[in-house]
Amino acid sequence: MPAKALFSDRREASATEDEHLTPSQKYGVVTQAEYMEITGTRVVLNLAGADTMKRVRPGDFVIHLRSFQGGIERSAVAGKVSLAYTVLTPRALVHGPFFRWLLKSDRYVQALRVTVNQLRDGQSIRYQDFGKIHLPVPSLPEQRAIADYLDRETAKIDALIEKQTKLIDRLRERRSQLRGNLVMARSHTARETTNYWFGSIPEHWSTPRLSHKASVVLGRMINAAAAGDDDVQLPYLAAGSIQPDALVLDDSKTLAVPAREVSKYELRAADVVVVEGGAGYGRSHVLPEGIPGWAFQNHVARVRARKDDVDTRYIRAVLEMCRLSGFFEANNRTATLPSLSREVLGALRIPCPPVDEQREIADHLDRETAKIDALIAKAERFTELARERRSALVTAAVTGQIDVTKGAA
C-alpha cells in the first residue's frame, strides 16, 4: 500500500509545556535533556520558535534531517519538534514496532533515495515524497510476530557486536600499554634521572635532546603569501592525515611551495611525522617509504635522523610514550589550542640506548603490535560481518523473504 494510506501527516501545534525532543539515529527520539546527558553535548534550544513547533505523540514517527540514511524514528515519548521535521501518525493497519524495523531496512532506504531525487544531508523528506512509496503490509498478527522476531534476533547479534567492540578496545589499550612501557621494560641496572620525564633508565643509556639526534622542521603554511612565479603546487600531508593507526593521504588539496624550497619540505623513508597542533597533537608515524612530490603543512613536524646512530622507529616509540603518558598534555604551554612547537619537541630529553638496542626495541614493538593488529583486524571483520548479517536479516523479515512464524510457539 502507498505510505500515505498508512500514515497521516501530523500538523498539530505544540503547547508551551511540551518537552523539546531530539530525533537521532543512534538513540531514537529522546528528550533534549536526555540526549545531552547521554552524549555529553549541549543542544541550543530555539526558544524564539518554541510556540510554533510540531507536537509528537507516543507512537508517532519523526522524519529527521538524516532521512536519506534511514533517519525515520519511532517515538515512545510525547513532546515537540521543529517545523523542519515531518511527523507521521500511524493509521489502523499499522503495528508501530513492525514499521520501526521496516522503515530502517536497507531495501526501504534504497527505495527512498531513488524516489526522492538529489536528497542530501541536512534535508528532511516531505510528507508528499514519503507517501509515494509503496510498503508491504502483512496482517497485524504477522506484523507483531515479525517485530518480536527481530527484537529477539537482533538483540543476539547486538550482544555479539558489543562483545567484539569491547575486545577491540582492550586490544587497543594493550597496544598502547606496550608502546607506553618501552623504557620501563628494560630498566635493568637502572640509574636515576629525576630531572627528566622518564625516570630511571639503564646505566649505559644517554639522555640527549631530540634535536641532537634528529632535525625537527615544521611544514609550510597553507595560506602562505606567494613568493614568486616559480611557486610549485604540491599535495601535502596535513595534521588530519596522521590518524592513530594509519596515514590517510588526499592529493586533491595542494599548497604553494617556492621551487627553491621544495627539497626543504620533502618526505623521505624513515622520516617521523608528528601532529604539531589541534586535537590530535602528538600523534606520529614513521614513513615506511618516501612520498615523492609531496610537502607537509605547518601543523605537522618532520623529525629526521641526523646520523645513523638513531633508529627513527625508536624515536617514534619515545614520542608515543610521551603522548600516552600525558607528558605532552601536562607540558602544553598554550592557553588556547593545544600544540607541540618545534622548540618544545626539539628540546625534549629522550632515553637513548645504543643504536643496536634501539633496533631491538623497535623490532620487538613491531612484532608484538603486528600480533595485536592482526587480532584487531579479525575482530573488526567479525563485527562487520555481524552488522551485514543484521541488516540482511531485517530486510528479509520485513519483506516476507523468511517466515518468522515457523517454529513459533
Image (tube, grey):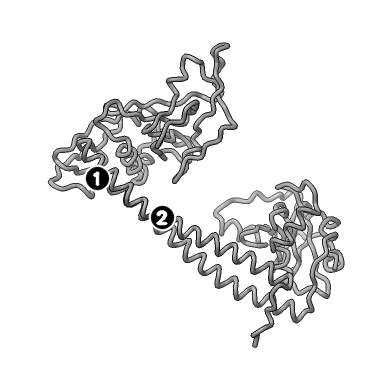
Q: Position of residue 343 (x, y in %)?
A: 35, 27
Q: Up-down: is 210 above or below 55?
A: above
Going from the N terminus, do you reach mark 2 or mark 1 first? 1
Residue drawn where x is 32% and y is 50% of the image: 367
Image quarter of residue 284: top left
Residue drawn where x is 14% and y is 38% of the image: 204
Image quarter of residue 234: top right
Find disc 2 in the rendering and name its residue.
374
Q: Is residue 382 left or right of residue 391?
A: left
Residue 124 seen in the current view = yes
Q: Is residue 397 left or right of residue 203?
A: right
Residue drawn where x is 58% and y is 62% of the image: 387
Find disc 1 in the rendering and name its residue.
183
> Quadrant location of the C terminus?
bottom right
Distance of mark 2 from mark 1, alpha carbons?
25 Å
Q: Position of residue 232 (x, y in %)?
A: 55, 19
Q: Nearer the viewer, residue 146 or 292?
A: 292
| Label 1 SS | loop
Q: Position of residue 1 (x, y in %)?
A: 85, 68
Q: Amino acid at mark 2?
A: Ala
Q: Up-down: is 128 above or below 259?
A: below
Residue 17 seen in the current view = no
Q: Amino acid at mark 1?
A: Val
